Image: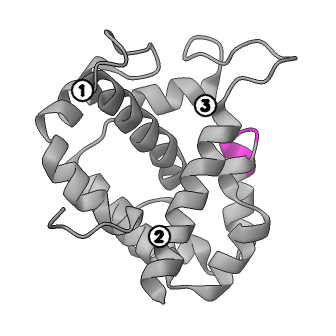
Amino acid sequence: MKRIACVGLAVMLASAWLAAAAPQAPSPRRTAENDPDSKEMRGYRLSIDNIQKYVAASKALGGDPSAASCFKDHPPGNAKTFAEGDKIIASCGRAGADISGAGLKPHDFLVMTGALFGDMMAVDMKKQGEIKAYPATISPENAAFLEQNYAKIQALLAPLMGESKGK
């Protein structure tokens, strides 16, 4: 049951963040040049260590019924800015403590949600031949890191996606 809650929470956070980061028709497209949150995501350096902490934080959040319940109605990824997302996490009981207990700051958890899943999606698309070059939203450093550690990162993220390590 905890695994289902963890998977659901991870998918909900990633989906909400990616939906919120998608450009909206009436406003100009958010880019790393004109949007501080996009710039922060592009500048965030992924590592095996912080991905392991991210997975641990996601599992802790998934195992915390109060955080899962709060995020169900108010996912931090739906916030328009990281600052608003930070406030949502702070208002969700033990959610901040769950994330901090895994070794990440709640703000870094938000930034990493966007950076990790957005960058992994870009790497997947390039590997499948759907794009020829990476979009400006992914840094060359993160692209190289994800390409070099692709299998290991997929194995680390598998529990969040409901997959077994053997797949």
Q: Nearer the viewer, mark 3 or mark 2?
A: 2
| Label 2 packing within 10 angstroms: few (<14), some (14-19), many (20+) | many
Q: Which residue is mark 3?
A: 37
Q: Give the vertical position of 162 relative to 114 (above or below).
A: below
Q: Is residue 117 left or right of residue 73?
A: left
| Image position, residue 63 (x, y; %) | 50, 85
Residue 21 has which mark? none
Where does residue 151 sit, x and y in percent of width and height? 15, 47
Whether residue 87 is visible here, answered yes or no, is: yes
Local crowd size for mark 3, using a 10 Å CA cut-off: few (<14), some (14–19), many (≥20): many
Q: Is residue 84 above or below residue 26?
A: below
Q: Is residue 20 left or right of residue 41?
A: right
Tell me which residue sits at (48%, 90%) in the image.
1
Please provide the residue range marked out in magenta: 80-84
Looking at the rendered structure, the kind of residue marked 2 is: Val
Badge 2 marks a residue whose secondary structure is: helix
Does the stretch in magenta take in 83? yes
Q: Residue at x 64, y 77 (%)?
A: 67
In the image, what residue occupies the spot 22% across and 35% down? Answer: 146
Q: Which residue is mark 2?
A: 7
**Circle 1 — which element?**
helix
Instruction: Give the alpha-carbon distance from disc 3 to disc 2, as whole Å.
Output: 25 Å
Disc 1 to disc 3, C-alpha distance: 26 Å
Residue with the most extreme right position? 26
What residue is shown with label 1?
Answer: 127
